Image (cartoon, rainbow, N blue to C red):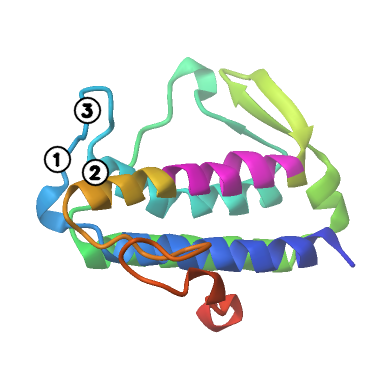
Amino acid sequence: MQLSQFLLPEFDAEMAYSRKHLERVPMDKLDFKPHDKSMPLGWLATFLAVLPSWGALIITSASFDVAPGGVPIPQQSVLNSRDALLEMFDDNVAAARAAIAGATEEQLTRSWSLLAAGNAIFTQPGFLVFRTYFLNHMVHHRAQLGMFLRMTGVAVPAIYNDSADESGGMFIDSAANR
């Protein structure tokens, strides 16, 4: 079985769980921060909508420079409507899923580098970068969003298991969410 076929079910499940969280973002509380060191809720939600684009980027390129020519890339502005947030997320998920489904073994096993001003920050096999710096990174920030939801009085979706607010997380049919 090809690596892409191992990655697709996990990708589908994680994206379905992430979308459930994004659907519940309280758009009237985008400035909420549980702590001075925390990012605002609006930026966190927008970042989660952007993150799936990293999956496609990792598969379709051999590197990414966060500061080409020494100039940091601009950040996405905070999305302030649920429709815009979900549209960006859905578009990025569709592009990433297409990249995974069409990925060759060479694309997934070649060396991939994160660069800053042309200098390598790290170089690892593409599938490892996909799993750690995209999928695991997404799960990490989705967990933060779950905490923000709880603190703003929004029901936290069930994911791998029941949450305090709902049951059935482990039974999402990821194939139905493509």
Identify the residue at image location x=60%, y=80%. 175
Figure check: 146 above or below 39: below
- Quarter of the image for residue 86 reads bottom left
Please tell me whether mark 3 sits on a helix, a strand or a loop. Answer: loop
Q: Is residue 73 left or right of residue 62?
A: left
- Please state the extent of the stretch shown in magenta in the rendering: 128-141
| Quarter of the image where the C terminus is located | bottom right
Residue type, mark 3 in image: His
Q: Is 79 contained in the magenta span?
A: no
Can you tell which mark lies on residue 35? 3
Q: What amino acid is found at the position of numbered circle 1 in the picture?
A: Asp
Binning the other alpha carbons within 10 Å of mark 1 as few (below 14), some (14 to 19) or many (20 upward) gives few
Query: Which residue corresponds to mark 2?
Result: 41
Nearer to us in this view, 153 or 110: 153
In the rendered image, the residue lying farthest to the left is 28
**Residue 76 makes an appearance in the image:** yes
For the residues labelled 2 and 1, the Cα–Cα distance comes to 6 Å
Label 1: which secondary element: loop
- What's the distance in space between the residues labelled 3 and 1, CA to CA? 12 Å
Q: Quadrant of the N terminus?
A: bottom right
For residue 31, the mark is: 1
Among numbered discs 3 and 2, the one appearing first in the sequence? 3
